[in-house]
Amino acid sequence: MTTFLSSWQDFKSVVEGTSRKLLKKTCFPLAIKQLAFISAQMQDEELSYHAVVCHSEQAHIQRKMNNSDEERKQYVIAANILYNLLYRRVNSRSRAHCYSRKEITVFYSRSISLCMEMRDLRVAGFTSLEAAKVLTDCVQSDMAAEHAQRAVRLLEGDFNALLQSLYCLATVHFHLSLWEHLLADVDDIWMVIMKCKSRSSMGRRVLKDLEVITVLILWRTQLSCSGRHKLLMSLYADSLGFHMRRKSLFPKVGTEEACWAFIESAGNIDRAAELILDGQGFCSIMDLRLPRLAHGSLSGRKTT
């Protein structure tokens, strides 16, 4: 308790020192260093929630110094501290965690707004992608979708970043059960890989997986099919029909396991256990494939 009060007294004295109207100019750089030290001290004392205030105050000081880039960074640091705190206590139902989620959203939104003001669209895109991933983990899917859509728009020219953004958006739509949007996302991922990485071994495997996922979505939702979708459905129709008939032999077998049997028949037996069984079929296979795809493992070498 003594160290906690001491840290807050130090924080208060630094903040008051930056707001006093003195004859000499306030030393903002010194105040920033002091706040950074206090933040580290609070985190060492496992007072991370309070350390966030130090970074928020640093952002305000950076604004006074007209340093938008550093202000942006402080908001991102504050959001990351809150996220790490929330992630460590994921099973807690404390009201403080509801506030943490809201504050994470606010900090990321401020950071992105500053990027847009600076016209640094690439950094805005990557910050949006980070925000989308964090908010997905925080079960804030609606806000995550908004950030992921922005990331897709801003990172269109970067294959790796665009692929991650599309995957993040598709994951959000999957969690929201927005099947039509998910189908469009899968088609977009398919097109991106087809344009850039279709000749590599990993690229061909991912394209095959995306085709299987497309058929599964169409099968489960009965959405209207485009020409390519109809072709895929016709290619897999025999296998799907056979395993749907086989499903009646197993009364307790769910949709996911029927999908598993279908995928086995489609020639993906070695990957069947990585798919649908956990009810997160799309996420399971894309978690396995896309990170490797997006980080340069498509050079044409055989991957294991």
Image: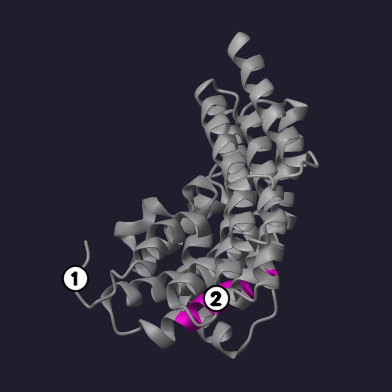
- Answer above or below: position of 298 versus 287: below
Task: Identify which residue is drawn at 60% across, 24% down.
Answer: 47
Q: Earlier in the sequence, mark 2 or mark 1?
A: 2
Left or right, 3 with respect to 203, comes to right
Which residue is nearer to you in this view: 289 or 147? 147
Q: Position of residue 272 (x, y in %)?
A: 37, 56
Quadrant position of the N terminus in the picture: top right
Task: Identify which residue is drawn at 63% across, 77% down.
Answer: 153
Left or right, 293 with respect to 170, comes to left
Which residue is nearer to you in this view: 76 or 245? 76
Tag count: 2
Q: Nearer the viewer, mark 2 or mark 1?
A: 2
Amino acid at pointer 2? Leu
Task: Identify which residue is drawn at 53% across, 61% down.
Answer: 244
Which residue is nearer to you in this view: 123 or 232? 123
Query: Dot 1, crowdedness within 10 Å: few (<14), some or many (≥20)?
Result: few
What's the magenta region? 180-192
Q: Is residue 140 visible?
A: no
Farthest front residue in view: 23
- Answer above or below: position of 261 versus 193: above
Is disc 1 placed on a helix, strand or loop?
loop
- Answer above or below: position of 121 versus 79: below
Q: Position of residue 8 (x, y in %)?
A: 67, 23
Amino acid at pointer 1? Lys
Residue matched to label 2:
155
Residue 13 lies in what quarter of the image?
top right
Q: Position of residue 71 (x, y in %)?
A: 64, 55
Which residue is nearer to you in this view: 185 or 24? 24
Label annotation for residue 302: 1
Q: Position of residue 170 (x, y in %)?
A: 59, 65
Task: Identify which residue is drawn at 56% across, 78% down.
Answer: 187
Farthest top residue in view: 2
